[in-house]
Image: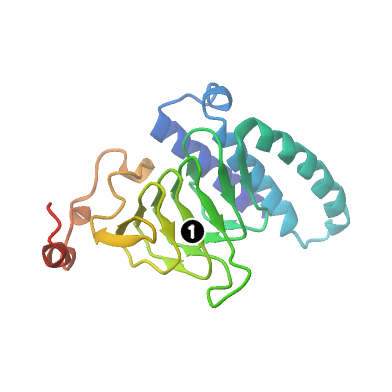
Amino acid sequence: MNRTLWTDIAADIDRFRITDHRSVWTMPLMCPAMLSCVMYRFQHAVWSYHGRFRLLVPILKAVLMILGRFVEIYTGIWISPLAEIGSGLYIGHFGGVIVGEIKMGSNCNLSPGVVLGQAVRGPKQGRPTIGNRVYIAAGAKLFGRITIGDDVAIGANAVVTRSIPDRAVVVGIPAEVISYRGSFEYILYRDREEGFPPEYEYPEPYDRVLDELDVGK
């Protein structure tokens, strides 16, 4: 658990450093969302812990719940300790982000006003499963038992209630696919800070899909 915890925290901090071009010492003030990511990592580690020191878990939960409330007030961001989020989470700017008990891959971007939550009734009852390197723009909402593919870009204020394929770009209410250019120009992490690898420049079959959709390149 410890190795995974510290590895995930280091990956989150590294994404803030690369994306915002900040030093470690200025990030707590200039990148408050980073504190939310770190708090989530500690809470998730404790909530999912079942080792030999589990008798201490209730005490740690109480402490982290109190600290988490202060972080939530300071950052305007709430992430459920039961969410399963891969390493390299980046949340841009302050406030209005609510992340429920979802599953999310690595190196994803969340923006202000994003809500990721469960549907508690109806045919879509359940939680979203979100792939790797997904960009979710400001105000977007994702609900229910849906699957979001890898490298997807979700536009501002989109409402997503059905599954989205890999590399899709979706906008609107309800969200509709407008291209398959993916999220590559929006997601920056250490393996990519020198530029996008050639294979990410709209390979087949995505060029054909763009032609069929009559979306300009």
Residue 109 image position (x, y, % from top left): 44, 46
Q: Residue at x 52, y 24 (%)?
A: 30
Looking at this rendering, what residue extends furthest in the front direction? 173
Q: Residue at x 61, y 56 (%)?
A: 100
Residue 107 image position (x, y, % from top left): 43, 49
Q: Is residue 112 left or right of residue 174?
A: right
Q: Residue at x 18, y 53 (%)?
A: 201
Residue 151 image position (x, y, % from top left): 34, 57
Q: Quadrant of the N terminus?
A: bottom right
Q: Residue at x 77, y 44 (%)?
A: 65
Question: At label 1, which amino acid type do we have?
Answer: Leu
Q: Is residue 9 left or right of residue 42?
A: left
Please give the residue where the numbered disc 1 appears in the rendered image: 142
Q: How many marks?
A: 1
Looking at this rendering, what residue extends furthest in the bottom direction? 123
Residue 83 image position (x, y, % from top left): 61, 57
